[in-house]
Image (cartoon, rainbow, N blue to C red):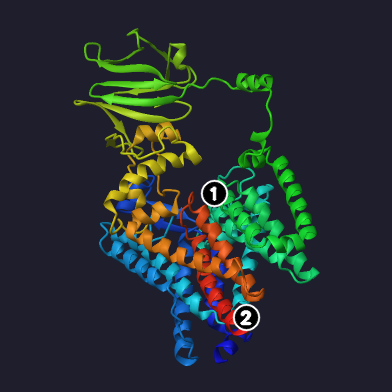
Amino acid sequence: MKNKKAVSTSKFSFKTLPIGLVLLIVPLIVFLKIVPLEGVSYDYWTGAKEYADFFSYYKSIWLTIFTVASSVFALYYLHYKKISIKFTHIYIPLAAYTVLVFLSTVFSDYKNISLKGFTDRCEGFLVILCYIVLCFLTSFLVTNLSDIKFLYICLFISVLILSLLGISQFFGFDFLQTHLGKLLILPKENSNMVDVLKFNFPKNYIYSTMYNPNYVGSYFAMIFPISILLFIFSKNMKQRLFTGVIAILSFMNFVGCLSSAGYVGGLFTLLVICILLRKRLVKNIVPIISLACIFVVCTFVMNYVSGGAILSQTGINKTLPVTASAANQKVAKQPVVNNITDVNIAGDKMTIDVNNIPLYISFNKQDQKFDFKDSENSSISLVNDTKNEGSSSLSDGRFTGINIIVKNNTINFQAPNTQFFVMLESEGFTLLNQFGKPTKMITADSIGFEGKERLGSSRGYIWSRSLPLLKDTILLGHGPDTFAIYFPQNDYISKLKYFDNMFILVDKPHNLYLQIAINTGVLSLIAFLLLNGIYLISSLKLYLKPKSINEYYIAGISSFIAVLGFLVAALFNDSVVSVSPVFWILLGLGVACNRLYRTISHHAA
């Protein structure tokens, strides 16, 4: 009876206040921090000695502050309010994951990066520890319905703000780019930047406060399904209107961010909802169809505004029949662009493929000049560009659009898709990297995805070059957030082929599970999978055939669906400080809801 009373009380307490503030405030933070770069951070960035961080640094700082505050609150309630920590099997893999992340940090060759995080990401050990602590604290500090409601209120206030901001960005009005918005995200000492600050994001681009639409997708892959669940379980018209509005706003961000990863995560959870709640869906068929109709209208309006981007991204338009004449017209309208598709350097000889047509370059020692020849050994002369002094083009029409600037022993190749410098030294030709320094080109080891490297915005390439790295991280990883250091960044030719940019920095694997396995080890990935697997299986056992439908059930299944949505989207997205705190808190909340629902059901029986 004592347990039943503890579960059923609705009295609000402050023990979950800092956790609620993480849900409410951390995702919203956008504020400039000029971060100096040195050491490895400088070597792997753009060559600047500092960078402007708007989206990660202060999120990590306030996440840490709120986590420390939450820990203090927890100690107080454990000691003075006699709240007990009830053991659950999920704590075993959670502890194992914590230890393995810690050891990967301790034995990392780049301890500073492992501790604080990589440039522009800030997801080192301290931030990951905050995730773990918040999950653990939430799982036992949430002891009643009042705690659950408070956390969901904090979450949905944040969701409302983020949704309105994202929608405004999609329709061309970005509050963060207004005079007032800039003043809010700039420190006083940088207020002179108000007139020059500009985020170079494309039109109809939802980045919200998360910098990247992919992270917006991960966020709303959690939130959109929750909003649908709350709409389904609304008890009266007032609740239905409120949850309906949240669902519509969430849907518009979910669709408008154009994140395929978000689509996969969100749609998968909707399928799970249909399976788990099929009987309830039938009972609420009229409001559900009404909401679905609004979704359809929103989709077509947003598709019109974006010039067809929505339906194109979702693949709906690809299912429509296309006539042969229309297809031919489309091909005919596309101009032929001569791109550099391959570069091969072998001593004092170099070959550049322009749309797979080879161009051979060598140095004529007798004439002291560079020779350019085609595959038939016919010389190709350089023609001076009258518009651009010092620039030349090739006289052969097959290479139109390729500009060449020769200066002393250096050649600058410029093409529509890339540009790079090559220096002739005594040993032969040498590629210069983005910092103007001689660099060695390699062909990185790869596993799988052959011929599919451009899959998922070149994720196929990243994954195929990341998988071989796992052989060195079976027990421990290289350290949290060190992925960029160990990825074969000098696989320049493959980057040219699959990114059209040989110097792009690959700082994340676009897969949470690869990210964990490389940064903190395959063992830590197993612990993470066990942690979530135990939770998901226990949730399915409870909610597949529920003993009763009550508010604990609604909160529990909502948390379960949100966690599932994030984990599915994580097949294509990484962990990031803008989104991951919400996931870890919802995971902890899900554990608490399962415990409370199980207790209520037991006493009811």
- Residue sitting at x 38%, y 26%: 342
For mark 1, what is the residue? 261
- Residue reaching furthest to the left: 426
In the foreground, 362 or 330: 330
Q: Is residue 446 left or right of residue 168?
A: left
Distance Cα–Cα, label 1 vs label 2: 34 Å
Vertical relation: 304 (above or below) 119: above
Observer able to see residue 399? yes
Which numbered tag is attached to residue 386?
Answer: none
Q: How many residues crowd around disc 1 within 10 Å: few (fewer than 14), some, or many (20 or more)?
A: many
Give amino acid for label 2: Ser
Residue 429, position in %: x, y? 26, 26
- Residue sitting at x 78%, y 60%: 287
Vertical relation: 399 (above or below) 534: above
- Residue sitting at x 45%, y 25%: 415
Observer able to see residue 505? no
Which numbered tag is attached to residue 146?
Answer: 2
Q: How many residues crowd around disc 2 within 10 Å: few (fewer than 14), some, or many (20 or more)?
A: some
- Quarter placement of the N terminus: bottom right
Q: In this view, does 321 lie to the left or right of 209?
A: right
In the foreground, 601 or 92: 601
Q: Which of marks 1 and 2 is nearer the N terminus?
A: 2
Residue 50, position in %: x, y? 39, 52
Give amino acid for label 1: Ala
